[in-house]
Image (cartoon, helix red, strand yellow):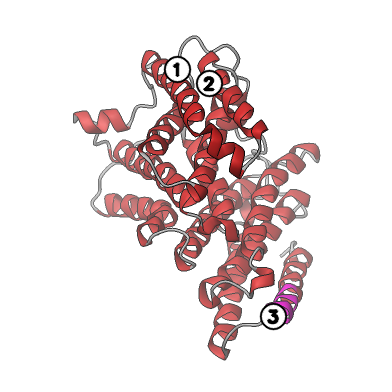
Amino acid sequence: MVYRRSIIGLLLLALIGLGVEFYLLPARSIFHVWGRLLLTAALVIQIVHEVIAHEHLNRPNPRAALYPTLGAANVLTLFRGVLIAFLAGFLVSGLPPKPFRWVPGFLFTAAILLDFLDGIVARLTRRPSLLGQHLDMHLDSIGVLVAALLVVRIGHMPWWYALVGLARYLFLLGEALLRRAHRPLHPLPPSPTRRLLAGSQMVFLAVALYPQGAHPGVRLVGTFLSVPFLLGFVRDFLAVAGWTGNTLARRLNSDLWPQGILSLVRWGTGLLLLVYTWRVAPVLSAHMTPLSVFGHLLLAFLLVGGVLVRLNAALLLAIVAVHVTFMPEHVWHLLLLIGGTTVFLGGGGRYSLWTPDDTLFLKRLGAR
């Protein structure tokens, strides 16, 4: 195999990382020590096997010759896999000791940044590859599965949130059952929100893995983001299975949000934020700073005007999560979450003044 050095380097890196991890983050029992070790090692071996099994994809297109080496971009992708394998170890041992509670969140944040970086490196070095695309999707699925199970394991999200990590594997299982039943598989229709849903879920998982992820506001935002994410997989499976004859399936298989309704939701959310800020201004000044009131008002006016709509909707979701940590949950929070989530996923609708952030959220800038 021509990639022997890269594979050996990956295994040595994993071994060194495990040594450092066990030195800094001692587990509570021998079961946790060996469980963490075996799970991490199993994932690293699985990633190595994935590279070996798909070595024939290390080319820019099916007709091109194989690259002689893995290339810098694929090495970065494999390093991302090692970080995810380290993260998986905490599924056995739980959170590390108090001074290192930030480690799981840091590991997943670094994995997300490498997911963005490897595509850029592939373009700069002119080494795009089918192998890189395959590994990206494979590691995205494993990463979301591990992170989703871990936020449930440490109590930052309820048990049902594990469905977020299992969604793609249930989708693949459904495809396998359709093949077994000799049913034709249809191609996935284009979806402008598919990438947005996946990306927002990964960012949420990174936040939820930090110690601050235990706050009830984070759980509330995670619930609102997970529902459209799971419905997106239902929509895609209905499309692949060809079950689009009924009204529900047609609605789920459509990303064409009524633009007029989106405009009304954006205006309503902005005005609601104005009224809400006026009502809670004394509390904001006491718990934060007087400037925070101005920031809330500015955000509301930007939403009403349709400026950087998705970005400001994402900021609104973060703001509500913070507010719930020092204020009792209220119907205002629920309404702002509904409006913010709708605008974040659907956009600002008609009459939006300036929306360059659509490129940031709807296109994967680091794509291979």
Residue 247 drawn at (x, y percent) = 20, 28
Q: Which residue is mark 1?
A: 267
Q: Is residue 41 left or right of residue 71?
A: left
SS at circle 1: helix
Kind of residue at badge 3: Phe
Q: Is residue 309 left or right of residue 26?
A: left
Q: Is residue 279 positioned above or below 148 on the image? A: above
Q: Residue at 50% x, 40% y: name it.
A: 320
Q: Earlier in the sequence, mark 3 or mark 2?
A: 3
Q: Nearer the viewer, mark 3 or mark 2?
A: 2
Span colored in magenta: 17-25
Q: Can residue 269 be seen? A: yes
Residue placed most toward the observer, 10 or 51: 10
Q: Is residue 343 positioned above or below 150 on the image? A: above
How would you classify the magenta stretch by its main secondary structure? helix
On whether residue 266 falls in the magenta region, the answer is no
Q: Which residue is mark 2?
A: 303
Q: For the residues marked 3 and 2, what is the alpha-carbon distance in whole angstroms?
A: 48 Å
Q: Which mark is residue 22?
A: 3
Q: Can residue 62 be seen? A: no
Kind of residue at badge 1: Trp
Residue 275 drawn at (x, y percent) = 46, 24
Rendered-image quadrant of the C terminus = top right
Q: For the residues marked 1 and 3, what is the alpha-carbon distance in whole angstroms?
A: 52 Å
Residue 62 drawn at (x, y percent) = 60, 41
